[in-house]
Amino acid sequence: MRPIPRQTEWLAAVMSRNSPEAKGSLTRYRVNLLLFAVLTAAATLWFFLHLKLWMEATSLLGGTVSLWALWKLLSSLPSSVTDEAGSLGESFVGESFLGSRAATELLAFLLVLQALLYATTSSIYLTYDAAPGPSEYLVEVKRFGNPYLEPLKIRSQQRVVGRPFFLAGKRELEFRIVQPPGFEPERRTVYPWNPVRLQVPGSFKSRQLATLRVVPGLSLLQRLPKRSDDPETLYSLRVAIGGQTFQLDDLRRECVLLGASGEALEWFAAGQDKDAFRQVLLEYLTRARVPEAKQAQHLVRWQAEARHLATSELKPEDSIKVEIYRAGADQPIASRPVTMKGGAKDHIDTLVLEVD
Amino acid sequence: MLPRPRDFLISLTLGAVVASLAFPPAAAGQGSKPIVSTALVIKAPHFVDNLKESRRGVETHVATELALKAETHFQFLSWLRTDGSAEPVDAELELQLVTEQRQYGAAVLLKYVARIAGKELALPQLPAQELYDVYDDQPSHSPSLLRQDLVAVVQTDFANDSFLRKLHKQFLSKIPIANQVHVHEVGESIVVPFAWADLQATQESQLRVEFEGEGPAASTEPAAHGAAMASLPNRSTGLAASAQPLRAKQEGNMGLDPVGEIELDAWRGMVQCNVAFFSFPPIRVSEVGWDDRIPGVLAEAQSLRVFMEKYELDTAADVRDGTVGEY
């Protein structure tokens, strides 16, 4: 009999193929292998659920280890053991350890730990929905109206964002796609053991918005100061929406975008309706008989970056009132009721406002 | 019934006639230039609303520029920028910034308004000119830009001979520079009590005298009319006919060619003029000359006023801006 490196009493017993200790150890070995396979699979699943960003690596590693454990389990079935009882004697230290009681205790402990981890780990992950549409979304997560996470930016090239939470309690969260606008907020209850998954934008109901671009007409331009002026007299724009009034101070010879939150307005401002807007302006200038040579300066001014007035969100058919006030005056110099039209996702209604 | 005879002899023996005005100009005193004030009044509502305090600065600056430019070309008048004081003036030249409402807004116009003795004159040849169209970048919040644009208009106008001629014809030639004349009978000339040095005019200039006097009544019978003609004073006799026929008030006028400064002590420094024409029916002098009846008519004249009918600046006396003008 050749010497066995790091031989233990247990190994010596195992090497005696007909001993009762050898048969008992084989059973423990099989049970431990099963426990190991279960532990590995559960760990892989936990990673899959809560550490989604590292899912591919953990799946590969965990899956490999689990498969190895299953393979060893199958290879230790009674037929092979009886036929090849000496095989154990040729195995390495790890295999020998799996046949020990200490291994059973360790695996049982790890399984309990795994169960605790499952019970106390929650996670929030957003996944880019590979559907035709914008390539980028900005999602706010709020709890009690306050930000719960930094705004999550999800792109077609960064398809998963989120993080796990340990020992976090039950939470009522509101998920809102702020860019692009046009989606209802989604509310979810997150339990301590709860993995929350949201498809963006698939998990959010869409809704139609209506935004308004107020363009100062020629008569109003005469009244308002230029951006470069240092005016003695200031003007303001007021919008009445429902019972609320929103005001933009120090209005200049510029367009104003309103009818949504600040982030939504930014998205609309960067939108694709520029050609349609230019067409509206050209038609107006033609109606006003502005010579072509003079049209360019107005187009440049109107198409420059618009001021944003964040308001409550407007929908098609909403009625609002737009007014321009001179500082200190009780009566507006321009006042116009507007019924919102809305349209395509990035459509902006245009109002060319003139002095009354 | 025949009118009461007039004693022309008395007036002729004086050697001069002083005709007084029934309605003298406010400050056209003997020897002094009439005062013409200049002003800019911003009336366009959006400029008034927006410029607030700086509006006064623009008005003052442009009014000063207007006075300077006018003085350069019309030195027989004393140009004064209106500074809000209550100093009486004979005439006013005002620029008004007004709006004209159009379909898509208000165009801003600049118009000259002229007043003599507080009464506004029509200036049909100087219509309002458009400063900003509806679609122009109107500097309603920028006093510096507005001032710059207005000064540019004033400078352009006063560099334009046509504009100057029209301004003179429609306004300045209607400002009385004197309300009396003296007849220099020996010299067969008229002396205007206005300092030659102040007139700054060449001999190509011409003065116009308007007056009212009593002439033969239109209803007078031919015989009486003939008598009236005979009754006008005659230098050769220095006497008037004893019988004066019917006399009715009528207007007369006289053109005067300034020839220079008179050297007689009594009127030293005043403007001596030849009579270019005289019209007081039936007396007519159509060329430079003299009629012995002129002193008599002027002695009786009422509401006499002297105007600068045609003005040619004497640049040799005082060259300013290198400009030579005839208006």
Image (spheres, coloured by chain):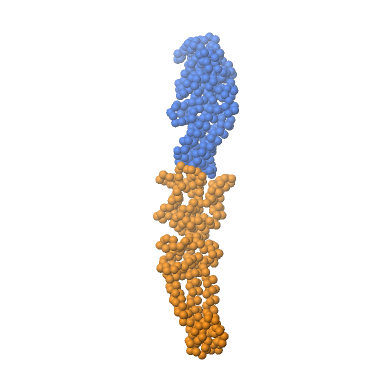
- Indicate whether B157 appears above or below B270: below
Residue B217 in sight from this viewpoint: no
Where residue A164 sits: x, y (%)? 47, 68
Give B268 or B131, whichever is nearer the viewer: B268
- Residue at horizontal 49%, vertical 71%? A47
- Residue at horizontal 52%, vertical 58%? A346
- Indicate whether B11 appears above or below A44: above
Where residue B258 sits: x, y (%)? 56, 19
Where residue B19 sits: x, y (%)? 48, 17
Colour blue, chain: B
* Residue B163: quarter of image: top right
Colour orange, chain: A
Please tell me how many numbered marks the rendered image carries.
0
- Indicate whether A299 appears above or below B256: below
Where residue B161 sits: x, y (%)? 58, 30
Give A172 or B300, whichever is nearer the viewer: A172
Q: Indicate left or right for A61 with A317 as reference.
A: right
Give A85 or A317, whichever is nearer the viewer: A85
* Residue A89: quarter of image: bottom right
Toward the bottom, the furthest residue is A18
- Residue at horizontal 48%, vertical 89%? A20
